Image: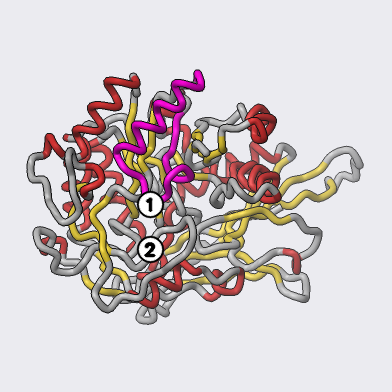
Amino acid sequence: MCTFRFKMWWMTQRMGSSGRDIPVETQFLIVEAADCAGDEQSAVYTVFLPILEGSFRAVLQGNENDELEICLESGDPAVESFEGTHLVFVGAGSDPFEVITNAVKAVERHLQTFSHREKKKMPDMLNWFGWCTWDAFYTDVTAEGVKEGLQSFEKGGTAPKFVIIDDGWQSVSMDPAGSAFVSDNAANFANRLYDIKENHKFQKNGRKGHREEDPANGLAHIVSEIKGKHELKYVYVWHAITGYWGGVRPGADGMEHYQSKMQYPVSSPGVQKNEPCEAFNSIADNGLGLVDPDKVFSFYNELHSYLASAGVDGVKVDVQNILEALGGGHGGRVLLSRKYQQALEASIARNFRDNGIICCMSHNTDNLYSSKRNAVVRASDDFWPRDPASHTIHIASVAYNTVFLGEFMQPDWDMFHVSEDHYSVLLSCLVLTTLRSSSS
């Protein structure tokens, strides 16, 4: 069994019995074989973990000769020379779960760039039922919509204790010459962040084109109201690791000190082979305003300190794998991802003392092997509420991904609609570490 990146952002599982069954972008592989002692009832489980070495990331792939290949990639055309000696960790034993845990801990000791889940502080929101606004509103979410959603839960007798205000609260717009991405139930990936504060939809008496300068009339007013009226313990908000899908607008008023510059992401050939991505293609066409890696802590700290001052308790940080495609000119994908992760974790530690962060769209080993503090990770591709055929696949995928991801962070199994049609699925998933609902 392996977990491989079937999309730019996400892993899923694949089963097989020969080398050719191992797909490109395989990041975790475990093989079951008969015990050499000849005991038919016993088996040996061997785990293969391709790791990071210097500026390079390794993955596995099979070929038509049933051979196992190692693929190395730096993500920067200027970084071609590899002098490392450690590419893949191999461990074996009779208990597959012990083998996996011991292997990841051995890699932890070797790399010293990440921490095992057991060493991380878990945010308290994991202990509560919550609601994410995404499937209810998509980017059309408003302060009034959040209040109405919480009221509907209370009327139904199931009041959430935390809410995630997803994509749609930020101040974003397109460049004048930008090419918009138009699709149902999706963001416009051509938009860029031009202010760290909320848009008019989350300002008291807000109106389009008007900027409310009093912080008390900004995001703080809705956070305070819903916490008081609905006895919420936690409010999280969404943002991309680059600010927004299209990054931070270079030279935007008040944001010049982040020194963002336009870059055009280049996808890994393995990712492109598995599945081309509309979101990525839109970003590649329009470019992304990448905050200077030396200024990114300042960006995160100013964003998160503003959110914390408004009563926000944590963030869902999305689109994380995009950094692997922006390594050109920065020493490669591994170094850029690590620098951003270090800045992100430092800002979270300073501003959200309960370690309030959910990592999302982050299923590459660049991120996993660079995370010392982040403790919660979305374990799956998106939940598609209006595609019933996808629901069983969704459950299977997050379960198998958890075998690997659970060694690094607490897996978050994403959302479900609260309706009678989904009740049996919900009951089967009560083992989830955190259950987030999206009202239909």
User: Residue 85, labelled with which disc?
Assistant: none
**Observer able to see residue 224:** yes
Q: Does residue 152 appear left or right of residue 39 in this picture?
A: left
Percent position of residue 164, x then y: 38, 38
**Residue at the location (16% across, 56% down)?**
209
Q: Secondary structure at mark 1?
A: helix
**Residue at the location (21% across, 66% down)?**
249
The answer to whether 413 is drawn above or below residue 1 in the figure is above
User: Residue 139, labelled with which disc?
Assistant: 1
State whether the magenta stretch is mostly helix, strand or loop: helix
Distance between mark 2 and mark 1 Cα atoms = 9 Å
Task: Identify the residue under disc 2.
Answer: 188
Q: Nearer the viewer, residue 237 or 242?
A: 237
Q: Nearer the viewer, residue 102 or 202?
A: 202
Mark toward the start of the polypeptide (2 vs 1)? 1
Percent position of residue 2, x then y: 67, 55
Q: Nearer the viewer, residue 192 or 28?
A: 192
Percent position of residue 121, x then y: 38, 31
Check residue 357 for magenta coloring: no
Q: Of the residues shown, which amino acid type is indicated by label 2? A: Asn
**Residue at the location (61% across, 28% down)?**
431
**Observer able to see residue 339:** no
Highlighted magenta segment, given as a residue range:
130-157
